[in-house]
Image: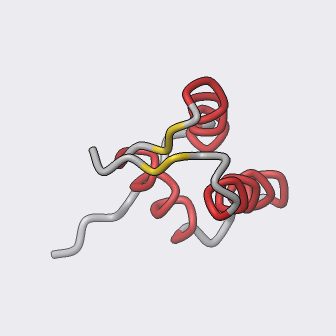
Amino acid sequence: MFNKIELLPGAIFEILVSVADTGILTLSDRYGLMAATLKEDLNEEERRVIDRLIYAVKRGKVLVSSQ
């Protein structure tokens, strides 16, 4: 009874653009990144984008929104 998590094509890059524009990682962005990390077939570029976003959060360059 588990639903399969599907990530829309290009969603990781859309999240990156959104975060670059706003400086905020939203709750829906975080769910998208979680879905992406659960995918086993991410390419290297997508993995690098996720790593960059995580690094930016850790350095305080991106705020994490609770909404």
Q: Nearer the viewer, residue 7 or 31?
A: 31
Q: Position of residue 3 (x, y in %)?
A: 25, 65
Residue at far front of view: 60
At 51% from the left edge and 71% from the top edge, which residue is drawn?
Answer: 38
Q: How far across and down, in percent of the image, does residue 5 sit?
A: 37, 60
Q: Residue furthest left?
A: 1
Left or right position of 62 against 35: right
In the depicted view, which residue is nearer to us: 10 or 52?
A: 52
Image quarter where the C terminus lies is: top left
Quadrant of the image containing the N terminus? bottom left
Residue 11, by quadrant, is top right
Question: Whole-percent x and y of residue 64?
Answer: 45, 51
Q: Is residue 19 above or below residue 40?
A: above
**Nearer the observer, 12 or 5:** 12
- Residue drawn at x 58%, y 35% is 23
Q: Is residue 61 rendered to the left or right of residue 6?
A: right
The residue shown at (36%, 45%) is: 28
Q: Is residue 2 left or right of residue 62?
A: left
- Residue sticking out furthest to the top: 21
Model colouring? secondary structure
